[in-house]
Image (spheres, helix red, strand yellow):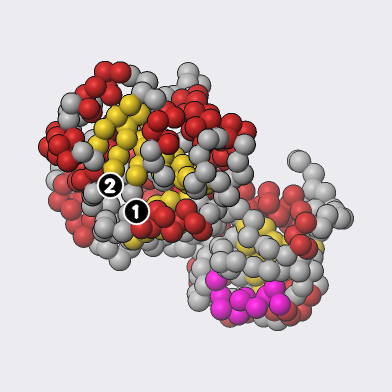
Amino acid sequence: MDISIFGLGYVGCVGAACFAHMGHNVVGCDVSADKVALINDGRPTIIERDIEELCRKGHDSGRMRATTDAAEAVAATDISFIAVGTPSTPHGHLNLDYIYAVARQIGEALRDKNTFHVVAIRSTVMPGTNEEVGSIIEKASGKRRNEGFAVVSNPEFLREGTSVHDFLNPPLTLIGTDSERAAAIFQELYRPLPGEFIATDVRVAEVMKYVNNTFHALKIVFGNEVGCICKALGIDSHKVMDIFCRDRQLNISPYYFKPGFAYGGSCLPKDSKAFRTLARDHYVDTPVINHIAESNELQKRRAADLIMEIGKRRVAILGLSFKAGTDDLRCSPIVEVVETLLGKGYEISIYDKNVKVSQLTGTNRQFILDKIPHLHHLVSDDLAAVAENADVLVVTNKEAEFADLPARFPGKVIVDLVRAWTSIDYDGHYEGLAWAPINTSRAQNRPLTSDFRHTDF
């Protein structure tokens, strides 16, 4: 394929060399005449393992050259990558001026071009940038998005020092697009590379680099805090974390990485608190570990606020135990939400087939007596009765019997704390706790009439 790459810095130079290595014809474009001269001399613009050899081979084969003329680069290619810098502003935002300037240049060049052109944003940008780039190109080119051109988001996941290897051996290739035609072109472009090819929503692709890098930073800090605690205890932290990483079923796995409600149960609250206490007893400051519980409490408050914002007095809680398939109420996060709602004057009914108040003993019974002494007046094992007499249905766990709730109880407001449905077409209002709206029914847009407003004290 014929590819142009705007920006010959770190990402652009690696991309140009690797695409040429894959057999594509590459035209680099940069405002710096020095960088252009280096590429045209078969030399890289950066210091990086293996990059010199690839640049030399790309130059010698005639598959890689560079120019300062944006119109020339666009005219000679079918795909244009934007790989210019996005430096931070003093307030922590990204300066996208370079991105938008290149978009205008590409748009102006497309005005005189009759073939379909794909613009790929390779730079790290905030969600919404793709849409703005498309608008700029439409205005500058006079063409319509997804007719004369398409804009895709194709974030890079390269590590300095191993970027060539990372480019050619990715765990996955990600693009965000609203164009099937562009998706097919990029699938063919990246076909030789290993790893899964994923085409997703534009804004999902735009946010992924930030999620990845924030988690990588979190892993480093978590490992360091564990190491400091272990040092204070005379423990080899590298042995600890080596064993930690061998668990691919829970520790290093997709498990727990599902946005939703707060954690609860008998283990996570107790043991994380004990670990924090251990650190404090040895005068080890661990701010990340210390704030885990605080973040969990905040998620409980978000759930209560979401329910109260709806403005309906009658609320049904579907599931009281801390997760599906158990009657364990210890540290169940929904118990605190119920307590908050009761204190605000809401009419609460609770359904949980696994929790029979009359049969509770020991810790569970004591927990109820301590937390919500009037719980036995609220709990029922009749799902239909609880749901029909409420305006808001709050789903707190993924019990199989909740799967057909939308079909059984239309017109209600469903508050989903656990992403019980991947997608939903519900004749009523649906609100998820930690994800964008997924209800495709027009009923979602009907205005809600509030019958109750809680007080702020």
Looking at the picture, which amino acid does disc 2 mark? His
Q: In this view, does 89 lie above or below 267?
A: above
Is residue 364 something one can see in this rendering? no
Q: Can you tell which of label 2 and label 1 is closer to the viewer?
A: 2
Q: What residue span does the magenta drawing correspond to? A: 398-407
Q: Which mark is residue 11?
A: none
Relative to 165, is 293 on the left or the right? right
Q: Residue 189 carries which label?
A: 1
- Distance from disc 2 to disc 1, alpha carbons, whole Å, reads 9 Å
The answer to whether residue 286 is left or right of residue 56 is right
Secondary structure at numbered mark 2: loop
Residue, disc 2: 24
Three-letter amino acid code of the residue under disc 1? Leu
Q: Are marks 2 and 1 in contact (CB under 8 Å)?
A: yes
Q: Is mark 1 on a helix, strand or loop?
A: helix
Q: Can residue 180 be seen in this view?
A: yes
